[in-house]
Image (tube, rainbow, N blue to C red):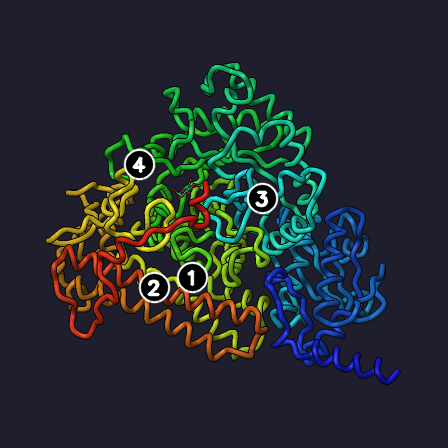
């Protein structure tokens, strides 16, 4: 007995010493580890019993999540009940499914299918918390919000919250191939085990759905936009249906990327011409087949006539012809088409930044009602910084869907700590001036500017089979912030970062504040050490790892860094003014005038819009060359500062995650230095200018940096 007591005591001591508990990141922001005792005491009398139905699968997962969350956070099981017996009950559901909730007569009007209320109420003299929605999924979202309040140590008395999403489709796009590889994936292989589906439904699929539902994501495109036709064959549709079954209770619909030429490849037709009746009939039949298996199937995502993919232009038809043909096949079932505007062609000598606008703007008003045009945040390709895409605000008759890249193809892969919230926020809050001041990108995509009911945001996922899902603990924050901004694109990325840090690590303010500050500065640091002052696309060819501003080896001109920076002995930058490529004219007149004038252009976009002499005087009074070197150097200094911040936080969290972050920051510092030195060495070889006083020369020669070659780079080299 005595030995047993000692063992129990030791185990209790180990579990109390939470800062040293090893963790692997699998639980994401849904850890539900015990709150500090003082917090538990506070919450205990406000969470005494749970009244939650389980008549549907969504109600069932809502109830389980609340039980799991409450028992984890409070350290004891909260009893289930079917009526209120004490103060402190938590009641969750809809007026239709619960007489108790119906009797509260709360105003659930206009909550729509996903909204919810969280209210402190009195029931028969007992204080209670009601989580109420019009649908089961709305109640699930409310339950996750309520748990978030506890996880982030917020008060739960006197609650009066009302939430509805501003966007209808909140979707992850997986760039996963059916062979298990993930294009631009830095977190291992695809989480979809296609071979074992439909018979084996890995528990991880459920955890994936939980995580998504907790942040309001309600759709997932399972396969890469560079799609094969095989996904549409009966055997694969069975596998897709199995995943849809797992996700359904969590309010998540599945979508598929389709290959436009599938009617030829798996349908035996001679053409995929969207105006051909046989092709149309094939897609109608395919849609019917899919909906028989998956009644709530979401629809199709399409990359057409872009980077070698087939599309309607192969038959001299427009993107609208192609999208509408698919939309008509899906419409009877309520499905949508998300048609990508990421198009450019090497046959077109026009500035690549202009090509999507040139092709899509004339099609405004020509898409059917269930089509969204999915536009990347900037005109080039998810660079550390670009101006917002000029299509936002330029297609008032078409619902435009935002596409962000959550996976960090151009921002340091898995190992650089870069919180993308500020990047997303910068784009969403940018003013398109399409309908005067205040016509922000957020208002374009939430439909409020032009009154579109169909709205959405897509994020190219950073998820893989790594235990921590995203390749690093901090990359989880990018999945998280994407979901929260897709729910409400007006939110501040700082407050979302704070929630994430509290849920993922600790509520200890001595940790939260410096870590949130570090995250908020991390994207600007990366812009500085990679592509400051409006430079873009300086990365290594094909794999996109590391700097290669000198590279001209790519087969196509607009895949080469030299195409983008245009550095010569006189100066640097791409002239997109009215005397250059005139890309500025694609923006609203007031913005076009601003970007056209070198003096009015925000310096963060200077070299994106202007070719500027090396001795150009910046607002600081320094020359452009001096400032370029200063930005590159600052980026490295900022990463060193991040390392220092992290060093001071040792002991605040578990050793396992702490150590990996520290190791990754060391990689980031090394690679930031490499970016700085390689870019300075190269640009100096072009400008012929000495380094400004006080700046260290590159550590190695330009020849050395140019000689570096990489094999098996994740996300690319093994295709
Ligand atoms: C999925 C860039 C990436 C490609 C990606 C493409 C796209 O070109 O490098 O990997 O392909 O964008 O978004 O379609």
Q: CA distance from mark 3 to mark 4?
A: 29 Å
Give the mark toward the camera: 3 or 2: 2
Instruction: Specify the label residue 672 is tagged with.
Output: 2
Would you call the spot at circle 1 few (<14 residues within 10 Å), some (14-19), or many (20 or more)?
many
Separation of marks 3 and 2 at Cα, in angstroms: 36 Å
Q: Quadrant of the C terminus?
A: top left
Q: Which residue is mark 4?
A: 355
User: In the visual, does 111 lie left or right of 628?
Assistant: right
Q: CA distance from mark 1 to mark 2?
A: 9 Å
Cβ atoms under marks 2 and 4 closer than 8 Å = no
Q: Nearer the viewer, residue 298 or 84?
A: 298
User: Label 4's element?
Assistant: helix
Verify CB contact (< 8 Å) between mark 1 and mark 2. Answer: yes
Q: Which mark is residue 416?
A: 1
Q: Earlier in the sequence, mark 1 or mark 3?
A: 3
Give me the disc on residue 219. Answer: 3
Q: Earlier in the sequence, mark 4 or mark 1?
A: 4
Looking at the picture, does residue 270 appear above or below residue 646?
above
Along the line of sight, which residue is nearer the eye, 526 or 6?
6
- Left or right: residue 137 compared with residue 601: right
N-term mark: 3 or 4: 3
Q: CA distance from mark 4 to mark 1?
A: 31 Å
One can see residue 369 in this view: yes
Q: What residue is shown at x 65% (from left), y 69% (from top)?
A: 150
Q: Where is residue 145? Give x, y as percent.
A: 63, 60
């Amino acid at each position: 007995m005595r030995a047993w007591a000692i063992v129990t005591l030791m185990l209790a001591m180990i579990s109390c010493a939470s800062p040293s508990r090893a963790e692997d990141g699998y639980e994401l922001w849904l850890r539900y580890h015990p709150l500090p005792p003082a917090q538990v005491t506070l919450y205990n009398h406000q969470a005494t019993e749970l009244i939650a139905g389980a008549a549907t699968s969504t109600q069932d997962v809502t109830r389980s999540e609340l039980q799991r969350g409450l028992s984890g956070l409070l350290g004891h099981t909260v009893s289930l009940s079917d009526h209120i017996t004490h103060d402190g009950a938590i009641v969750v559901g809809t007026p239709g499914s619960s007489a108790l909730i119906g009797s509260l007569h709360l105003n659930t009007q206009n909550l729509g299918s996903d909204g919810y209320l969280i209210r402190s109420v009195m029931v028969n003299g007992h204080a209670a918390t009601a989580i109420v929605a019009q649908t089961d999924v709305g109640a699930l979202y409310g339950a996750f919000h309520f748990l978030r309040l506890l996880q982030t140590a917020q008060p739960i008395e006197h609650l009066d919250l009302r939430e509805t999403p501003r966007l209808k489709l909140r979707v992850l796009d997986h760039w996963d191939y059916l062979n298990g590889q993930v294009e631009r994936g830095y977190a291992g292989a695809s989480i979809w085990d296609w071979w074992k589906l439909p018979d084996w439904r890995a528990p991880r699929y459920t955890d994936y759905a939980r995580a998504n539902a907790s942040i309001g994501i309600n759709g997932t495109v399972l396969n890469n936009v560079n799609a094969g036709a095989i996904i549409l064959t009966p055997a694969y549709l069975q596998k897709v249906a199995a995943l849809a079954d797992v996700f359904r209770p969590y309010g998540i619909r599945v979508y598929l990327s389709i290959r436009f030429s599938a009617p030829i490849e798996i349908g035996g037709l001679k053409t995929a011409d969207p105006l051909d009746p046989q092709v149309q009939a094939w897609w109608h039949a395919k849609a019917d087949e899919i909906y028989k298996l998956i009644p709530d199937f979401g629809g199709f995502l399409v990359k057409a006539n872009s980077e070698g993919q087939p599309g309607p232009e192969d038959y001299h038809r427009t993107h609208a012809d192609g999208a509408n043909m698919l939309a008509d096949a899906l419409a009877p079932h309520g499905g949508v088409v998300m048609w990508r505007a990421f198009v450019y062609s090497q046959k077109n000598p026009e500035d690549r930044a202009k090509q999507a606008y040139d092709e899509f703007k004339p099609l405004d008003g020509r898409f059917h009602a269930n089509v969204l045009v999915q536009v990347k945040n900037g005109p080039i390709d998810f660079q550390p910084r670009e101006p917002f895409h000029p299509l936002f605000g330029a297609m008032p008759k078409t619902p435009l869907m935002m596409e962000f890249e959550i996976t960090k193809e151009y921002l340091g892969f898995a190992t650089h700590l870069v919180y993308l919230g500020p990047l997303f926020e910068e784009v969403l809050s940018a003013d398109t001036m399409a309908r005067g001041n205040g016509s922000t990108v957020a208002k374009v995509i939430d439909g409020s500017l032009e009154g579109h009911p169909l709205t959405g945001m897509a994020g190219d996922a950073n998820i893989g089979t790594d235990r921590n899902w995203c390749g690093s603990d901090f990359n989880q924050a990018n999945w998280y912030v994407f979901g929260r901004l897709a729910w409400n694109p007006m939110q501040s990325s700082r407050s979302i970062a704070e929630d994430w840090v509290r849920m993922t690590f600790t509520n200890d303010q001595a940790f939260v504040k410096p870590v949130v500050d570090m995250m908020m500065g991390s994207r600007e640091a990366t812009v500085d050490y990679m592509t400051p002052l409006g430079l873009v696309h300086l990365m290594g060819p094909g794999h996109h790892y590391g700097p290669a501003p000198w590279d001209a080896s790519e087969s196509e001109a607009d895949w080469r860094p030299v195409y983008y920076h245009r550095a010569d002995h006189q100066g640097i930058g791409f002239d997109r003014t009215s005397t250059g490529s005139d890309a500025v004219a694609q923006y609203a007149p007031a913005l076009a005038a601003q970007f056209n004038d070198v003096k009015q252009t925000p310096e963060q976009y200077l070299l994106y819009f202007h070719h500027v002499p090396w001795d150009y005087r910046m607002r600081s009074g320094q020359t452009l060359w001096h400032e370029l070197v200063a930005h590159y150097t600052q980026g490295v200094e900022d990463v060193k500062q991040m390392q220092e911040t992290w060093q001071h936080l040792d002991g605040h969290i578990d050793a396992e995650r702490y150590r990996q972050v520290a190791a990754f920051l060391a990689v980031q510092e090394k690679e930031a230095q490499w970016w700085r030195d390689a870019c300075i060495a190269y640009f100096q070889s072009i400008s012929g200018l000495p380094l400004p006083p006080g700046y260290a020369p590159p550590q190695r020669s330009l020849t050395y940096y140019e000689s570096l070659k990489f094999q098996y780079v994740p996300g690319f080299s093994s295709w």
